[in-house]
Structures are given as C-alpha cells and as structure tokens.
Amino acid sequence: MSININKSCLLAFNVYFKLKIMKKFMLTMIFMCFCLIIDNSQANLLKNGDVNYVKKADFRIAYSYIIKHEGWYVNHADDRGKETYGGISRKYNPNWWGWRFIDEYKKKNGPIPRYTHFPELNFWVMDYYLDIWVSEHFYNLHNQNLANYVLDFRINGTIGAKLINKSLTELGAQNITNKNVIDSTTINALNNINREMFLNHLKNKRIKFYRNIALRDSTQKQFLKHWIKRSKSINYE
C-alpha cells in the first residue's frame, strides 16, 4: 500500500513540476511576443512623430550585452560563484532549473569542458535574467545603454545594487534606500540623473569594489583584468 502511495506522490510531483515549467515557459514566450508588438507600436509612433512618446529599454538588447561578457559552462576552482553557466552561479542560485540538465549530462558524460554551450539551456538562461528585469522594474528605464550597464553590475557584483543606490544618493538623488535591492525608486532616480556623470561615478565605484576583492583574496587577482575591462565597457549615448 505504501509503495502505491509513494508512486502516486511521485507521479503527482512530476505532473506538478512539468506544469510549473510549462507555465513559466508560456509566460516568457508571451513576454517576448509582447516585445515584438511593442516594437511595431514604437515604429508607428516614431513614424507619426508622437511628441509624448518615451521609448523604454529593451530586455533583448540588455540580455545580449550581458551574455557577451559571460562564458557558458565554467567550473573554476577559484571562482567564488563556484560552478556557473551563462553567468548564473550554482552557489547563489542552487534552484535554477538548468542545473538539473547539467547534472544529468555529467552523470552520462562525465566532466564538462570549460565554455561548453548547451543550446537546450538558452531559454532558461534568458528566463533567469528576464525575471530580474521584470521584478526589479528595469523595463521602465528610458535609456538603453544605462539599462545595460546597471543590469550588468547588478548581476555581476554581489553588492552591485547597493553600490548603484549609493552612487545615486551621492549624486543628489532623494529617498534612495541603501539596501542591496533595485526598486521603483531606484529606477525613477536613474531616469532623472545626469547619465554620463552617474555612469562615470558608478564605474569608479565598481572598479574599486573589484580591486578590494583582489586585495583581500589573492586568488581573485586572476579575474581582475576581466572585471576592470567589463567595468569600462560603457556607451554614454
């Protein structure tokens, strides 16, 4: 009797899990379709010269910006994030769905070579960053290049959000929390700050943050050159 109950529970869990994945997949696809609709709407508004139209940052562009800086599969012994895929750390994101695929692959094929790309995981990597984009209101940013840079530091720096908020406060923005979180107040301040001044200020903070990591832990010095290069990758337009 208990065996049948266990089998029923396992079957129920598998059905629930598959439905949950399907729901997430459908929501992400709906969002991407919505992006295409917005593209067409934006084109029409620009063509008709609508003076009240304010263009917003595009997730797809920000995602491409992040991925060009991230390797695919990496399991570097000295990486604080330990095993990572597409910039997603297993240490900080142990429940990311892609680890299930990776673990099954390792069971069947052994260790994975560095920078291996699994096309099967493209959706789940994009979905991970899309969750951040939506939940933290990045879609309300007006400037694409600002959105790219801020999102990149938000996900690459462990206290990136805190330093973004601190930079805004130091440049005169009001009512900004000093917590390590991006919220609508942060987004509103970013839309109203002097963009070039803010990006330079944040760039310097970001470089100092990475240098301090390398000073405190000599094993991290090998990553410093890449971190600084990434910090200086700014488009001020």
Image (cartoon, helix red, strand yellow):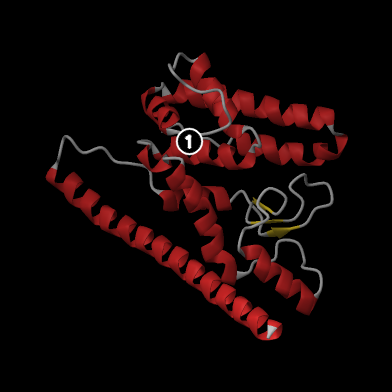
* Residue 54 falls left or right of residue 25: left
Which residue shows up at 44% across the image and 66% down it?
A: 23
Image coords of residue 174 (percent x, y): 43, 16
Q: Is 234 or 5 nearer to us in this picture?
A: 5
Image coords of residue 164 (percent x, y): 54, 28
Task: Give the quadrant of the N terminus.
Answer: bottom right
> Which of the 4 image quarters holds residue 112?
bottom right
Q: Is residue 173 visible?
A: yes
- Furthest residue toward front: 1
**Label 1: which residue?**
235
Image coords of residue 109 (percent x, y): 78, 77
> Which of the 4 image quarters holds residue 140?
top left
Image coords of residue 171 (percent x, y): 48, 15
Q: Is residue 63 visible?
A: no
Please, what is the three-letter code of the amino acid marked with disc 1? Answer: Asn
Which residue shows up at 37% across the image and 58% down it?
A: 31
Task: Give the quadrant of the C terminus.
Answer: top left
